[in-house]
Image (cartoon, rainbow, N blue to C red):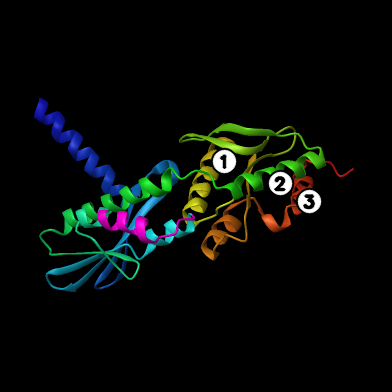
């Protein structure tokens, strides 16, 4: 009975994990695998597996790990890079021209991929997941608050809003009241990871709150093209920090702000 339960639990876990791993065949010798990590942040670790010889495989992060650290505001130099190298060394990973790289044979390919994912996750947990909001984000929140105060628009600040999967805190919330609502977030450090996390948050909120639109005010001086693409194409309302006054027209079009 105990073994049956253990075997069932292991089997169900493997079934779930396998269903959540995404893969894309690039060509005969290259595949990209995407692993589900940190659902709350919608952060998925991607690795490329390349078969360079019949019994030699190269695992790489596509230089994304160090790129995300820089996008989050870290200077990947001296002390920080030494810490990352130390984490990588324990997982038999090298850093080659910004790429995290590991070599393995066919027999060890599975364990090597798992070890690679765990090392990347460790770096993300240490330097990305718990990163505090930068001062620029607080300044941008204050700018939006001052603009809304000048427009005399009532809103709820830092309002927890329930999604289908989890609860999210919204910087500026305008509840539906005869007109659609608006959940407006502020992003002072719009890295690709932060944009993906916001995309998850907004979609999760809208699954439960059908009459609420999702919006974002982001620092366009810091946003890369990939971040802008996510924020502009997914958001119902997307306002660059260089044009906060355009929020007035958006609020009027929704009906939150009167035309008088």
Q: Quadrant of the N terminus?
A: top left
View extreme (top): residue: 1
Earlier in the chain: of badge 2 and badge 3, it is: 2
Earlier in the chain: of badge 1 and badge 3, it is: 1
Inspect this view and state whether residue 211 appears. Answer: no
Please tell me whether residue 156 is drawn above or below residue 61 in the rendered image.
above
**Badge 1 is on which residue?**
206
Q: Quadrant of the C terminus?
A: top right
Q: Is residue 31 left or right of residue 164?
A: left
Q: Which residues are magenta?
A: 73-86
The tag on residue 249 is 3
View extreme (front): residue: 78
- Say which of marks 2 and 3 sits in front: 2
Q: Badge 1: few (under 14), some or many (20 or more) residues near its Cα, within 10 Å? A: some
Inspect this view and state whether residue 161 appears. Answer: yes
Q: In the depicted view, which residue is nearer to us: 90 or 257?
A: 90
How far is mark 1 from mark 2, CA to CA? Answer: 26 Å
Q: Position of residue 55 (x, y in %)?
A: 11, 69
């Amino acid at each position: 009975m105990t073994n049956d339960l253990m075997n069932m639990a292991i089997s169900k876990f493997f079934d779930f994990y396998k269903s959540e791993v995404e893969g894309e065949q690039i060509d005969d010798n290259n595949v990209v695998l995407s692993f589900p990590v940190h659902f709350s942040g919608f952060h998925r670790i991607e690795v490329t597996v390349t078969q360079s010889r019949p019994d030699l495989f190269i695992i790489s992060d596509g230089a994304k790990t160090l790129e995300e650290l820089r996008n989050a505001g870290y200077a990947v130099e001296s002390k920080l890079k030494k810490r990352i190298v130390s984490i990588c060394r324990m997982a038999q990973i090298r850093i080659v021209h910004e790429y995290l790289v590991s070599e393995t044979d066919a027999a060890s390919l599975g364990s090597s991929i798992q070890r690679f994912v765990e090392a990347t996750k460790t770096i993300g947990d240490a330097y990305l997941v718990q990163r505090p909001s930068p001062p620029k984000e607080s300044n941008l929140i204050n700018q939006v608050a001052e603009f809304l105060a000048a427009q005399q628009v009532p809103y709820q600040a830092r309002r927890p809003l329930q999604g289908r999967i989890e609860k999210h805190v919204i910087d500026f919330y305008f509840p539906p009241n005869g007109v659609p609502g608006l959940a407006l977030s502020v992003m002072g450090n719009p890295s690709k990871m932060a944009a993906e996390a916001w995309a998850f948050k907004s979609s999760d909120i809208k699954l439960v709150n059908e009459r609420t639109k999702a919006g974002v005010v982001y620092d366009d001086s810091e946003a890369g093209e990939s971040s802008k693409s996510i924020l502009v194409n997914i958001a119902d309302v997307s306002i660059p920090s260089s044009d906060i006054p355009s929020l007035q027209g958006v609020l009027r079009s929704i009906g939150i702000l009167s035309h008088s």
